[in-house]
Amino acid sequence: MDSAHRFDLNRELSQWRLALGGREGITTDQALELETHLRELIGTWQAKGLTEEEAFWVATRRVGNLDALAAQFIQADPTMVWRGRVFWMVIGLLVIPLLQLATSLIGGGLIYLCAKYDLTVPVNLIALLASLLFVGGIVALFHGLVAGRWPRLSGALDAFCSRRQTFAWQLLLLALIPPLISFMGLLVFWWMHANGWTPDAGERAVQEAVPHIRLIFISQSILWPIVLAVLAGKYAPLRRPKPPSERG
Amino acid sequence: MLPKDLIAASSRPLILSILQEQESYGYAILQRVRELSEKQIEWTDGMLYPVLHRLETEDLIVSEWKTAESGRERKYYRITPAGRTALRGARQQWLVVHETLAKLWTPLTASI
């Protein structure tokens, strides 16, 4: 058998779980739980003499069509879907402004330090590294969350978002966060205006001498596209595993 | 085989009763139902989990991930005090249905 087609149970299982977890109405935690169920079934069939690959296909067939399964979850708890959506809206509204604030502080702080102490070369390098780390970290974080890489964390998040009791608080946060952010922005603007703050010649010179500092500010603006791309990856139809008969 | 609606209606008291005995996980609950009913009640593998989820959001059961002796991670479910109360209520209702039917069927069984 060609090594590219060798059957890897763990890979097939994680693909199955991703395909299931990508469906609306099923949380990462539930997908993980159903994966453990599939493992039990596979064990039973292997004990009856099937190979790992055969046992996998029999077990997935037993669990059945994933869309039908997701529909059963939604039928059992129709408001679950919206609780999940609202939860991610709250996370997005909370996390993204915080990250933008953090990048602004780092970028602004670097410019200030450069102007004061006349550093250019190391800061240029640090700025490049910081922006790369930032973008990489965000991608890894969201991708890991969506793929269920940290079962405990995802489980805790899912348990939180699926509780009816916390839903009211989430809605309240959703209503409060945007005006709160606008208000804080206004406060900062007013404070800068009151202190007559404008970038001085030294700071402008630093921005020209250390071009990579701009990367930190640019990395801010690609936050939204990253988040959208990861979510699109979650909800886009994932590659479904093919049964052995359809393989070359 | 039982009809679908009867299977669906009996799934909640069955799950709660099994969890009242001891905490358990999805696969073991399915096995237990199959055993107890002598394969008369066959739940599909995907049917159980939405019901468990529903019971959990109603706070009748709670779940916890644990590592079994075999090293396998499993999500275990445990019944809550609210779950026990709900089970007592369900038990009463099922007994009413059972006793009513039993009264009607006793003379009939003799004639069959």
Image (cartoon, coloured by chain):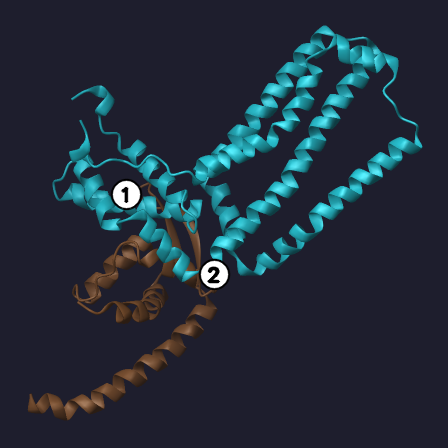
Chain colours: A cyan, B brown
**Type of amino acid at the residue the image marks with label 1:** Arg
Name the foreground residue: A91 vs B69.
A91
**Residue at disc 1, secondary structure:** helix
Query: Which dot marks residue A39?
Result: 1
**A113 relative to A193, above or below:** above
Q: Residue furthest top?
A: A121
Instruction: Say which residue appears at 26% left-offset and 50% top-offset.
Output: A63
Crowding around mark 2 (Cα neighbors within 10 Å: few <14, some 14 to 19, many 20+) is some
Circle 2 residue: B57
Q: Quadrant of residue A228?
A: top right
Residue A82's spot in the image, x, y percent?
A: 52, 54
Q: Quadrant of residue A108?
A: top right
Chain for numbered disc 2: B
Residue B106's spot in the image, x, y percent?
A: 16, 90
Residue A102's spot in the image, x, y percent?
A: 70, 30
Total numbered labels: 2
**A91 relative to A201, above or below:** below
Instruction: Say which residue appears at 38% left-offset and 39% top-offset.
Output: A237
Chain for numbered disc 1: A
Instruction: Say which residue appears at 17% left-offset and 38% top-offset.
Output: A54
Task: Please state, as top left, top right, bottom left or bottom right, where the N terminus of chain A lies in the image.
Answer: top left
Name the side, left or right, on which A93 lies relative to B73.
Answer: right
Name the side, left or right, on which B31 lies relative to A140.
Answer: left
